[in-house]
Amino acid sequence: MADAPKLVNLTVDGKKLTAPAGSLLIDACKNVGIEVPSFCYYPNLSLQGACRMCLVRVEKMPKLQTACTTVVAEGMVVATDNEEIKQARKAMVELLLGNHPLDCPVCDAGGECELQDMTFSYGAAESKYMEPKNHKDEQQWSPVVFFDRPRCILCYRCVRVCGEGMDVWALGVQNRGVSSIIAPNKEDHLECEECGMCIDICPVGALTSGAYRYKTRPWEMNHVGTTCAHCADGCKTTLGVRRADEGMEIVRGDNRDKSGINNDFLCMKGRYAFDFANHEDRLTQPLIRKNGKLTPSTWEEAFELVGKKLNEVRMRDGGSAIGVIGSTHTTNEENYLLQKFARAVLESNNIDHHRTADFPALAAVLSGKQEITASMRDVYNAPAILLIGNDPTEQHPLLAWQIRNNVRLHGAKLHIINSEPIKLRRQATSFTQIPVGAELNAASFLAGDDSALNAITASASRENWAALRNQLRNTENLVIIFGSEIRGAAVTAVTHLASSISGAKVIALADYANSRGASDMGLYPDLLPGYHPAAKSGLTLPQMAENAKSGKLKALYVVGSNPLARFHLDSQIFAGTFVVVQDMFLTETATIADVVLPAANLYEKTGTITNTCGDVQIVKKASEVNGPKSDFEMIVRIADAMGYDVRNLVPFGRGETADMGQSRGAQSGEADRHAVWLQANNLEPKLSPFDPMAIFDEIQRLVPGYRVSRLNLLSGNDEHTQLSQSGPGAKHDPALIVPAHDNLFSSGTLGRYSRALNSVMENRNPQPAEVAAD
Amino acid sequence: MADLVSHPDEVRVVSKRFGKGATNIDRYIELDGYKAVRKALTMEPDAIINEVKNSGLRGRGGAGFSTGLKWSFVPKQASKPKYILCNGDESEPGTCKDRLIFEHDPHAVIEGVMIAALAVGATKGYIYIRGEYRYLSEIMQKAIADVYAKGFAGKNIFGSGKDLDIYWHGGAGAYEVGEESALMESLEGKRGIPRIRPPFPAVVGLWGGPTVINNAETLASVPHILLGGAEWYANLGPPKNGGTRLFCLAGDLEKPGVYELPMGYNLKKMIYEVGGGIPNGRKLKAVVPGGSSTPILLPEEIDVAMDFDSVAKTGSMLGSGGVVVLDDTVCMVKFALRTIKFYQHESCGWCIPCREGTDWLKKTLIRFHNGAGLKKDIDNMYYLSENMLGRTFCPLGDAAAMPMMAFVKKFRKEFEDHLDGKPCPYEKASEEINRELAVL
């Protein structure tokens, strides 16, 4: 165990306090509630000493000292609040305001501006200057980044977060003296990852967001903390929503709440790509195919039709003639409900989803063993990381941030094995390039199979490989992260390596916001929630397509997925299949559907999602578009339309003690357990059939890995689930995994309908890369 | 190339080879060159440091820190290479002494670097020359090439088994880089912006290695100390202010030029005897004692010994040895503007008070001198300077604030005489200043 840090005693404003040796005075003060103002100081970025706001008087020092660069020392006596210091702060604010335009009434930052706050706190209400302010024109650096130059106070936060935090280094300073100016890397524009961290970190309104600027004032928005809907990393995000004609519109995404697993971080998608919600192509009315044409209809008509048709097929051809395809963008509760609906109502195990990682294989190795999955927070603190496959910079921006900043701030050792020279190699202690597709060989070698190298490396580099393996084996608390290149047997090999290292943990990388949840909640033909085997296996997604082709699949229910585009299916094969699609847009799959039901997205509903590491987090309803319904409601309504007692689907209703465990529960023959469990956990039965928390109750009861602190979860914190408590998992055909290959600026269907993402893509490439979508 | 001047009171130590062709390495060797370094090679490093410490040599760049003490801060054992860095970024207005050293006696600087390297265990020495001194860098390059050719630098210097590389590096035209940590940044190829201290360069300097940074004149003095002995050198000046100093006499003088005088030489005598007094029968108005950043002195304040401690007692500083003499035709508002304009132009822009403060001072002074000044401007300018002083990231802000405060304090009446649209009451305004003001 590491020794507790040595403490030093100091006195600040007459208050005696202790602080860890080596800590900065500004932090020591903050920790005891003494505010020392600053612009340029920002935790975890390099020190600047530039803004001079944090000047304090340290006894025995001839001049005022900057608290942000002063390290605490034993016996130090500090004053932070006397006339001299007040005057110094006031003078700094006066000097800044001298050239800073006072366009606060129209400035984006007005109301959440640090310079405003400082002016309010430290005075400088009167200007001493008569000359005109220095003016420079505003610049647009990218579709999403604008720079209003005169507002800049040169705190260099943007420069540092871009360079040190993002390893992009797209910002710098030009000229000198009063002409000093922050400048982008390509003459008049940015060529960067468009993460927008520079905007977020700007203390004033100098850097503004193309998606948000001049749209509203901060106090006119509601700020809803939720989880990002895009990749599988699960960044906490705060959405600024405002009333609009069509409901509640999201006007801004940021992460003002720094408590999430992403801390300061958000990427391009999390920050700007919420605009799909209000895209003009958004479906707001159910569509029914009449005379070959999709025609707007009422919800009642649509549900009645779907219920009738599904009942017909089930009774005539049996549940095996119905297929269900779930989503990687719906909540855990919806996914759980969907598979329960399939199995209990449709009486079909034909359920699948777009798989992007081999979680069943991981569950198979870990089931009943010691828990060795790592959380996203672990990645930031691990002493060493082994990354096999994937390019986190493009596909897992938060993961890349965690790795990069762990290396930078904590000196973690990063070892990379990849077929491409990915950007993270710049942080790596070792980078080993392997042929495409050789990940299994690499994993097997690391797990102890010496012969595995034969196919992929010349004998000359064998020593390096052996050295790497030795080093890894001796690295306690190593976190091993692997992309979808590692599947099936390779998962076993990697996990064996991890089990042989004390404290080592693993992360399997999937591609979408709730890919992990879809998997954990049993969107598999052969696996129930929690990776328990189903009594009888149903059809996989490709098998459903085959059955459709041969005329055996009579109905297909697609929730938030676009299999036609993703799996390049011929639309003709569904000619004899009754297809129901729930989606936000008329996707390729929706186009061939018989009924299309407009769905709410992840920002328009409440529930939980699980990131690729297994960290479960809450999503809160932030916005609303009039018309669409949540998938949860639609599933329940269809069950109802089929004449099913929805009380058996969603455990709700006062005083009910009926068996509501129809998924695993029904199959294991349990009864009344849910009511008993609720009582034992001091929980009330839910009152609405549309209450996702009723299903979450059931998930927590039946998926032991999800028995996390509900209090913590509902407070907006992340809770790591335990994959080791799952059932025995399964070995699947590795070919069933189809990586999404999204990059920083693409995101399946959501990305296709995001103007922000498209504008950046167009700006970069005349021909935006074509991206298959879900 | 500047004409050399002389005066009987001069004590020629650093300037003893000026005008004697010492840029030629053989001539330099004839004139006792590279003897001191040979002697240093026979000495223990601590003995060299002690000798320099005892000589009372203090930094000639302006701060006046004991050179020997500075060297002693360098750790004996270091995981990174140690460096000697010669600060030849001479840019303080009124100062032109290092220029003569580079021009007439470049090998003395190189020899000083070598001795410093031996004293602290450095294996690399850099001589950083101000960008505008391009014509001097050729002299330095030639000198370094000659030193390598003789086997005095590189591997196994003087056959001693020790290695020492010497490089020169040109600046890019920033006054700020005369500040030692900014100089290191510049040398590393970055923007010339000072570093946060601590850590000090002696511990973490160039490329993270322990580094000694000394002014060119300081290093050029070192060989003489080693040859003449610490006691001899110390006794040239008053206590704690050993040796001689190159004083750059400029402004309204009969005989301006660079004179080497003992430390502690009387300023009044310097002006009236060495510099030949004020021409055209004019009266003395004020004296800048040590470069433009040092607060100006009134005629009644100039009966002072020019050593670090005595000048400090007047509220000014000995600074870099640039003595600027102003006669009674000089407009002090214009002079203040000229001074502030320099600092405004040279502010690196890193910290708020210097970046913004110098700019507002300049703007106000321009308006003020143009006759649109208000009474409150005078107090505002003082207030601004007062709020810059001691609060900037590096001493450049102080360098602007200190003289500005002195101008207002000592010449308040002259500022008031400019109020209410009155024309500048001082006729003399050199063509040069007028031209520069026109483009402001």
Image: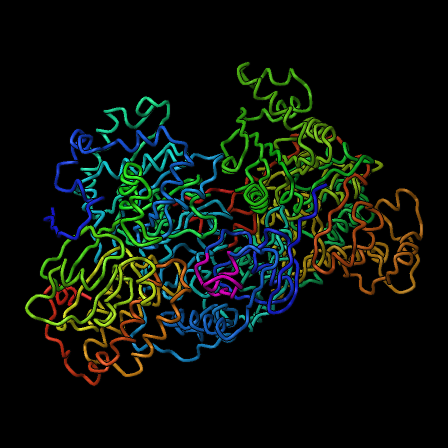
In this view, the residue farthest toward the left is: B280
**Is B407 on the left-hand or right-hand side of A741?**
left
Q: Is residue A563 magenta?
A: no
- Residue A54: % across, % down: 50, 64
Note whether residue A554 is visible: no
Q: Nearer the viewer, residue A190 or B295?
A: B295
What residue do we see at 69% from left, 35% from top? Answer: A358
Please, what is the dominant secondary structure of the magenta stretch? Answer: loop
Q: Quadrant of residue A704?
A: top right
Question: What range is drawn magenta here?
Answer: A49-69
In this view, the residue farthest toward the bottom is: B420
- Residue A435: % across, % down: 53, 24
Q: Quadrant of residue A466?
A: top right
Q: Is residue A63 magenta?
A: yes
Q: Nearer the viewer, residue A266 or B230?
A: B230
What residue do we see at 23% from left, 69% from top? Answer: B337
- Residue A709: % across, % down: 79, 54
Residue B420, relative to residue B99: is it above or below?
Answer: below
**Is A184 on the left-hand or right-hand side of A313?**
left
- Residue A479: % across, % down: 66, 37
